[in-house]
Amino acid sequence: MVRKPEDLVKGVVKLISLPEIYIRVSQILEDQNHNAKQLGEIISHDPALTARILRIVNSAYYSLRAKIELVSRAVSVIGEDDLRNLVLATSAVDTFKRIPNQLVDIDLFWRHSVHTGIVSRLLSKHCNILHGERLFVAGMLHDIGKLILYFKEPALSQEVLLAAAESDGQLFRSEQKIIGFTHGDVGAALIEAWKLSDTLKEVVAYHHTPLKAKNYRMEASIVHIANCVVNALGPDIEVDEHLLDDFPGFEPKSLEITGLDLKILPDVMEQAWEQAAEVLDIICPRV
C-alpha cells in the first residue's frame, strides 16, 4: 500500500539524483566572489552540456542578433539565473532516462513537457514576470511525478489510466481517488528532495489546481494555462481565444490571476512551435 509521495521519492532519489553539474553551478553562484569565467569553466567540463547550452542560446528560443560562442559570454547575455535554469532543464531528460517506463511513450512525454515549458515562458512575458526561464523549467518538469508513479507503482498507475479514460480524462482526479495523492504531489516531493526552489515545488504540486497555491499562484496559473493549451491542441483544432472553452480541468480564474487574454494564443503558439522544434532537437534529440 502506498503511504505518501515522499515514500516513492525516497526509493528513487539515488537513481534520479540532481545532476552533479547543476549542483556545482549552484555552488559557484552562491559564492559572492564568483565570475562568468568560472561558470564557463565548470560547464565546459561537460562538452555535451556546453554544446546544448550554446545551441539553445543561439536558437530561436532567444533570437539573439549576434552568435554566442562561449558559455561565459552566454552568462553575460542571458544572466546567471537563466543559465542555472537552462542547465537544469537540459540535464533533466538525461537524469530521467535512468527510470524505465512501460506505461508512457517517453518521446511524447517530453514533447508535451517541452511545449508546456516554452508556452509557460512565453506567457510569462505577457505577465511581466522576470526570469521566465524558471517558468520554462516548471513547465518542463510539471509532470515528472508521473514517471516516478509509473516506475514505482505500475499496477496502480495502470488502474488510474483506465479509470481516467473511462471518466472525464482528468488523470489527477483518478490518482487522488485510487492512490490518495497525485503526480503533482510526487513531483513536488522530488523537488523538495532535490532542494530546489519553493516556487518550482509549488508550481509542480498545483499545476492542475492553481487556486490551491499559497505563495506562487501566478506562476502556478501560468503553467496551468500552458498545460491546458498544449493538451487541448490537436491536428484539426484551431488556435484561438476559445480553445479552452469547456476544456475539462481548466480553471477559468487562472486568467483573472494572470491577467492574460487568450486572444494572444495564436501569436504565442506560432512562436512556441518555432522554438520547440529546435529545443526538442537539442534537449530530446529522439523526439
Image (tube, grey):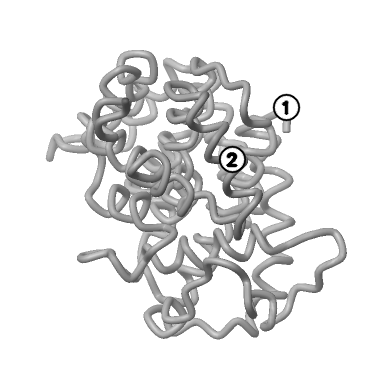
Measured as percent of width and height from the top left, residue 211 is found at: 33, 71
**Residue 63 percent location from the top left of the image:** 63, 57
Image quadrant where residue 84 sits: top left
Q: Residue furthest left?
A: 32
Q: Nearer the viewer, mark 1 or mark 2?
A: 2
What is the quadrant of the C terminus in the image? top right
Q: Amino acid at mark 2?
A: Leu
The x and y percentages for residue 43 are 41, 25
Of residues 245 and 202, the one drawn nearer to the viewer in this rendering: 245
Question: Residue 28 or 3: which is nearer the viewer?
Answer: 3
Image coordinates for residue 280, horizontal then vertical, percent = 67, 39
Label at residue 161 = 2
Image mark for residue 286? 1
Q: Residues within 10 Å of mark 2 (few under 14, many from 20)?
A: some
The structure residue drawn at horizontal position 46% and vertical position 61%, both measured from the top left corner, is 223
Element on which disc 2 rests: helix
The number of discs equals 2
Q: Which kind of residue does numbered mark 1 sit on?
A: Arg
Residue 38 seen in the figure: no
The answer to which of 162 and 111 lies nearer the viewer is 162
Q: Secondary structure at mark 1?
A: loop
